[in-house]
Amino acid sequence: MLDVQSTEGTVKLEAPRQRKLGVGILGAGTVGGGLIRLIQEGLAHRAVAVEIKKVGVRSLVKPRSFTLPDHLLTSDLKPIVDDPEIDIIVEAMGGLEPARSLIERALRAGKHVVTANKHVVSEWGEQLHQLAAAKGCSFLYEASVAGSIPIIEILKEGVIPDRIHSVYAILNGTTNFILTRMTESGEDFHAALAKAQELGFSEPDPSFDITGKDAGQKLSILISILKNQHCHPAQIDIRGIDFLMPWDFQFAAERQWVIKPLSIYEEVDGFGFACVEPVFVPRQSVFASARNEYNALCLDCQHIGQQILIGKGAGELPTASALLSDLRKIAESPGRPQTLRLQTEPGTLTQFRSSIENPKSYRFYVSCCPRQPEKRRKIYEVFSIDSELIQERSPCARSGFRLAVVTKAIPHSELFRILDLVLSFDPDAEVSWVRILEAI
Ligand SMILES: NC(=O)c1ccc[n+]([C@@H]2O[C@H](COP(=O)([O-])OP(=O)(O)OC[C@H]3O[C@@H](n4cnc5c(N)ncnc54)[C@H](OP(=O)(O)O)[C@@H]3O)[C@@H](O)[C@H]2O)c1
């Protein structure tokens, strides 16, 4: 009740009751189910004024982590998106289709959309942003990158008042979990992957995690926001973690390095270089302390130096809490749509280039197992020119000797010139390399 003074004295006015916004949730597995629990059971520290109107799933008989009246659950998703009582669609199904078409349909119908789907955002973000802006709707996706760490909000809102010229990040909890187990327990790759699957960290298809594709999609989303222009995942060089062998971990440990699955964006001479790859970082690095399924980001800023964020990057409640924070933004000011207007003017865009063209120099660890032992001396000679350490390590089954090399600081182009030369002497040599990042 409000007391209002008028010429006839004080009158009581009923405050207009705010209508709760109707929410339709597409997908109620780990993340969608977590969101339903957060909304219903009051697990969040601040309530959000929304009402769950419908929940779309594939199976109506599957046991769920939440309880809902039967009539709210449906396997027919289009009517949810078309329902006039629903103001916000939360997409937590995953995969490209039908998720993308349903998001598009919702925006066309003038509904706000919140999604956790990095696949859709990284590949279709530009079109969906344009559609949302044209329709005056919000299109938000905090949950698509780094789970509980609000990195999208930080980049989008310019919370850090400085130019961010590089981003180093662990964006994939599964590969971080696997590399942590291989480092700390000496577990082999397959056993560590099986454990990650058992704990529910990995994507349904783990090859998305292992090959670096998942982290590449997340990095492309961050770059798109950072540079305010669309960066497609295909513009990012990705390398998986499955080439790493026990001797690589042993060598790293002896020299006080740890192997971490990093997503990297660096600007050099006005060009952008983006990649996902395992790297060696010093044991004292902040990334070394981000173990198991944790994510971490280091934003390298022009004037204020490095800003570090660490938190849980996956799992039911960390990811659902990111969806909830987007829902809250919409519920608190539904009339103020929030979406990015990505720039498209060719003259203002940053050009993204392949890592091999990055002129910056790094030290690299190289492991080389030749097929032809008689090429030993020649291969030694090739490496010796640009290297500060060449060790002959435990014998390799195929040739009797294996080299572990640490190069001097050289650009990628020089590394590949050396590796090409080695392979020209011995085309079947088994060669792998890992970049060493010392300053993070
Ligand atoms: N899990 C994480 O830690 C995490 C972290 C960050 C982002 N994400 C993202 O969040 C999204 C959801 O992941 P999740 O782990 O929650 O997946 P999930 O456990 O497999 O849940 C997917 C949900 O969507 C429903 N669904 C999928 N396809 C459907 C279709 N064609 N028709 C109707 N319902 C369909 C499933 O129905 P049923 O239950 O009936 O099978 C299930 O409820 C993905 O985009 C993922 O990348 C997940």
Image: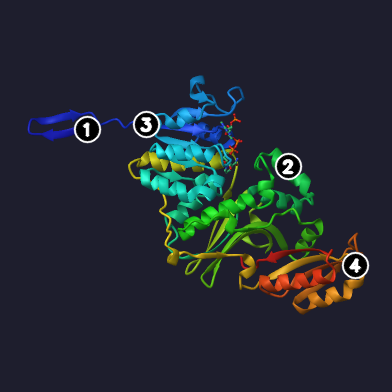
Where residue 388 appears, as percent x and y from the top left, is 76, 76
Say if mark 4 contacts mark 3, CB within 8 Å.
Answer: no
Mark closer to the observer (4, 3) = 4
Q: Which mark is residue 20?
A: 3
Mark closer to the observer (1, 3) = 3
Helix, strand or loop status at disc 4: loop
| CA neighbours of label 3 inside 10 A, class few (<14), some (14 to 19), many (20+) | few
Q: Is residue 3 left or right of residue 384?
A: left
Q: Which mark is residue 195?
A: 2
Marks 4 and 3 sit apart, C-alpha to C-alpha, by 73 Å
Q: Name the residue tied to disc 1.
A: 2
Q: Residue furthest left?
A: 7
- Judging depth in this view, the residue of 9 and 67 nearest the camera is 67
Q: Is residue 278 left or right of residue 122?
A: right
Helix, strand or loop status at disc 1: strand
Q: Which mark is residue 372?
A: 4
Going from N to C along the chain, the mark reached first, 2 or 4, is: 2
Residue shown at the point (45%, 36%) measured from the top left: 89
Marks 1 and 3 sit apart, C-alpha to C-alpha, by 21 Å
